[in-house]
Image (tube, rainbow, N blue to C red):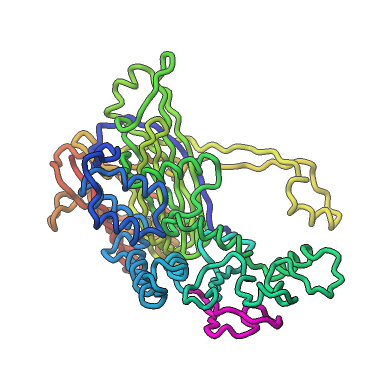
Amino acid sequence: MNRVKKTFFLVFIGFLALSFTGFAFGNPQKAKDEKMPEKYKKWMDEEVLYIMSDNEKAVFKSLTSDEQRENFIRTFWRRRDPTPETPFNEFREEHYRRIEFANKNFFEGRIGWRTDRGRVYIMFGPPDFRETNPGGSKGFLFEGADTAEFSSERWTYRQIPGLKARISRIEFIFVNYYETGVYQLTDNPALANALRNISIPERYVGYSDYIPMDSDAPDREAVAQQARDEKMLMSPMESLSLMAQLTKSRGEVLEELERTTRLRKLKGFVESRESLAALTFFAKENYIKGEGNLTYIPISMEVAAKDLSFKKKDDRYLGMVNFYIEVKDEKGTVYQASDRLEMKLREETYQRRLSDFYQYKHSLSLAPGEYFVHLVVWDEFNNNVGYFDRKIIVPQFSDDEFNISEVILARNLRIIEQKNEDVVMDTKDIPELDVLKGKELKVPDKIKITQERGGPFVFGNVELNPNTTREYTRDDELIFFYQVYNPTFDSASQVAKLYIEHQVWRAGNLITAIGNPREVHIPIEQKGSGLNSIDRYPLTNFYAGTFTLLIRIKDIHSGKTIEKKVDFRMK
């Protein structure tokens, strides 16, 4: 079973103006009259030196007030927080723990965090294996070679975020040159050879192209390269290059975001303006029972048209906004997707854009578990970027347990005609049919496959326009959708019975019942599929504030009752 499935859909909808809040910073130009206070300079040049990108540093140096710097620092750590929904930032705590450890254990006449060993430890954490040779004994780095060695250490990491998949591990070699007490990270382990300046055969030990003088190997470099390939290790120079690259890393959640040219460009803007997220947007994911053991997750992202920039060309106004989604688990990225929405507005549409918004609909399927979701919206014309990260817990829907899906709030819905599309394929393009040919069974040259057309928020013959902000006005209707799974069917009547109640509450008080409680009978022919439930209620008599929609369903035959709640706001 594939771990991830996906579909996507773009839509433009006219809507009443939404209220937005977001980061507000001054013009990020370099301050001329104000010198950066020492505590912020220390934070930039010492505390986060190894985990701060060049673009982040440039933005931080350009800020002109302490308030902007404090906002930047908060955003800096929040971007790296693996559990942003909790007050404890594990990334920040671990970072400062590493600095403290480096200062205590790697002092070399200068503070530990400034040493090569301290730098590697702070960037990558404790190695999986740390081998030390404090006395410079023979055979430590140069196994089997008869040569004296300087004191050295070898740190081995099984895996580092961003490491190429072809490499199974990476080693860093630190050498105490001439026993000065300073362990330097070296790109040439041969420098650990204490006899390299003496004119004897042992002086060549450790060089990557060294082959014993009595060897009859015709191509010493080829032999040396073969030995390196067999070890599947990074060369010392590759190690240094990787470390230089990952110095700019901003935590696992920001690594390897892009696989296409457009995504790489998007990443550049995110890096350079990540603490000036001027483009506010809203996003909401929903959880529905999917195929097999997967959970279906329709996602909606929307941004107000008033926050986007347009360029006039002839009689149209052009706009361009990009959407990006990345999902990670504890092992790394499991899903990425991006799309671009291009707008060409007529004059009258452009003039009423203050009450419009753009919505991006997407869907994917994930196995139940914990994930980190990274969302980005980028306006190409003004380069404003909005983003956020959050942890999600994808629920599991059992095949036999009575349950209901998450409740999806909508602004409106429409009944659609379900369309099937016939796709004709050459059987030679379907490798799975080769087994039939092998059994001398006749296989047609072409076959027709019928595909059902739909979208992320299409359920049966109903398409929802999700209310991502969960905000309504008195002119709106409260529209909501959910699915019911695995009711109990009576063996005699072959019918399942549900008692359904829909209510609206506020501050612990019942405001209204949506319709009368009702008993619903379900024939056994519908067993095994999710049962769609849709209801709507006018909000004319509601006033401003936050309300809670309560869904209560009782399985009459089993006696089990399930409740689901979802909040919405009246403006």
Q: Nearer the viewer, residue 334 or 556?
A: 334
Q: Viewer-proximal residue, 271 or 426? A: 271
Q: Nearer the viewer, residue 126 or 388?
A: 126
435 falls in the magenta region: no
Q: Is residue 147 magenta?
A: yes
* Residue 343 percent coordinates (x, y): 42, 27
* Observer able to see residue 468: no
Q: Nearer the viewer, residue 246 or 522?
A: 246
Image position of 306 (left or right of 569): right
> Residue 353, image x and y in percent?
31, 26
Q: Which residues are magenta?
A: 127-152
* Count of all numbered marks drawn on residues in the image: 0
Residue at left 76%, top 52%? Answer: 433
Query: Is 305 situated left or right of 254 in this image?
Result: left
**Residue 118 horizontal side relative to residue 222, left or right:** left
Q: Does the image show residue 420?
A: yes
Residue at 41% over, 56% down? 250
Give residue 507's quadrant in the image: bottom left
Q: Residue at x 64, y 68 (%)?
A: 233
Quarter of the N terminus within the rendering: bottom right
Q: Residue furthest top?
A: 314
Magenta stretch, overall SS = loop
Residue 36 horizontal side relative to residue 407, left or right? left
- Residue 545 horizontal/vertical position (percent): 15, 46
For the C terminus, give its image quadrant: top left
Give coordinates of residue 511: x percent, y percent: 14, 50
